[in-house]
Amino acid sequence: MSAPAVADQQDDQKDGGADGGPSRLERLRAKYAWLDHMVKAGGRYSERHGDHYAAAITFFSVLSLVPLIMVAFAVAGYVLFFNPELLDELKDSIAENVPGSLAGTINPIIDQAIEQRSSVGLFGLLGALYSGVGWMSNLREALSEQWAQVPETPAMLKRLLFDLLALGGLGLALVGSFGITGFASGFATDVLNIWGFGDQVWAQVALRVLGIVLGITANWLIFLWVIARLPREHATLRSAAKAALLGAVGFEILKQVMTIYLTSVTSSPSGAIFGSFLGLLVFVFFASRFVLFVTAWAATAKENEQPEEVPVPGPAVIHQEVEVRSGPSTGTAAGLLGAGLIGGLLGGRLLLGRRR
């Protein structure tokens, strides 16, 4: 195909052709409802600054890792403090696997960490509280923006309290959802082992399928809560059910893709050092974008679309205009000009008559 033909085809797709008809994208949107819905959701996501909010959510997600690690160290310190035998086994294992005198350097650090477990845990909890509330605040603002129903910002103390409660509710939902999933999967495994089917291939496949189904179910419950209840102005659960199912399936696919990505990144020596952190950063960013896009999908559904508010014009104000002119008006000037012409003609005839 020649270059002018390609240019004409692109113009037809963009402008609707020479006859001014609908473009190719418009025809496809009219034919496929899912494509029209996806285009609307993408437009809502872009118009409502989805990428900017996703970046803010990613920042606070990564920021919260440091205090969480501190809390984990504090918990480990309490466990080792109340279990001296486990502490001795840890030190012996370090002495056996670490070359040279490095064990003499690491063991005092462990003892010091155990002694400072309370302060480390306290600072870790404060940092986790700060970063967690910031993360939840950005998430709720982003979700509210995608719904295009952003209410007035509440007072600071009220907003912090609500964000803290929402953070606790989301944490309980995550723990409960994954706990139920793990319990159901483990219960099914125990039942198959009791019946003697645990080594069968079909039983392992069935357990795998059950794990995927339970994972999607857990994701659906979490997405349903996030899309409908976390925005500042709550939406109904029914309005977010379909979008939550899309989010659950898509999030499961995203997890599988990121698992493959992390495996490929951490295979190199440099990737073993920085790959995990970079992989986590990429995963959180794409997961944040996906959550916001799914929310935009829910907000642009036909049953959730709301007509845009047309601003009411202000009351009509009648002003009296007064024109001030320094000279005569147009009619007066025309009359004077006509009188002058007539006077000039009469005067000219009189002068000619006298000369004759």
Image (cartoon, grey):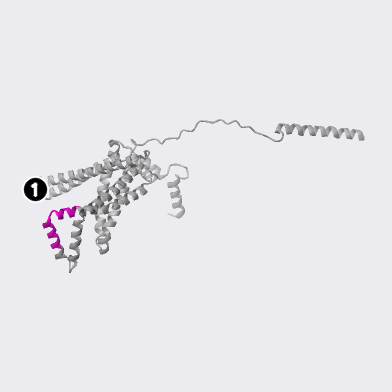
Label 1 neighbourhood size at 10 Å, few (<14), some (14-19), many (20+)?
Answer: some
Q: Quadrant of the C terminus?
A: top right
Please state the horizontal and vertical placement of residue 246, each as a whole percent of the image: 28, 43
Residue 186 visible in this rendered orientation of the protein? yes
Asked whether residue 213 appears in the rendered view, the answer is: no
Q: Foreground: 310 or 39?
A: 310
Q: Nearer the viewer, residue 160 or 180?
A: 160
Q: Is residue 353 left or right of residue 326?
A: right
In the rendered image, the vertical position of residue 179 relative to residue 278, given as above or below:
above
Residue 64, image x, y percentages: 28, 51
**Residue 341 drawn at (x, y percent):** 79, 34
Q: Confirm whether the magenta stretch covers residue 228.
A: no
Extreme residue toward the right, this view = 356
Residue 311: quarter of image: top left
Q: Secondary structure at mark 1?
A: helix
Which quarter of the figure is the N terminus placed in? Answer: bottom left
In the figure, residue 195 lies in which quadrant? top left
Q: Residue at x 37, y 49 (%)?
A: 52
Q: Residue at x 54, y 31 (%)?
A: 317
Q: Amino acid at mark 1?
A: Asn
In front: 282, or 242?
Answer: 282
Name the dominant secondary structure of the magenta segment: helix
Q: Which residue is mark 1?
A: 193
Residue 323 position, x and y percent, is: 65, 33
* Vertical comparison of 157 with 4: above or below: above
Q: Which quadrant of the view contains residue 350? A: top right
Residue lying furthest bottom in this view? 100
Residue 78 sits inside the magenta stretch: yes
- The answer to whether 179 appears left or right of 41 in the picture is left
Tell me which residue sits at (18%, 47%) in the image: 211
Magenta highlight range: 75-93
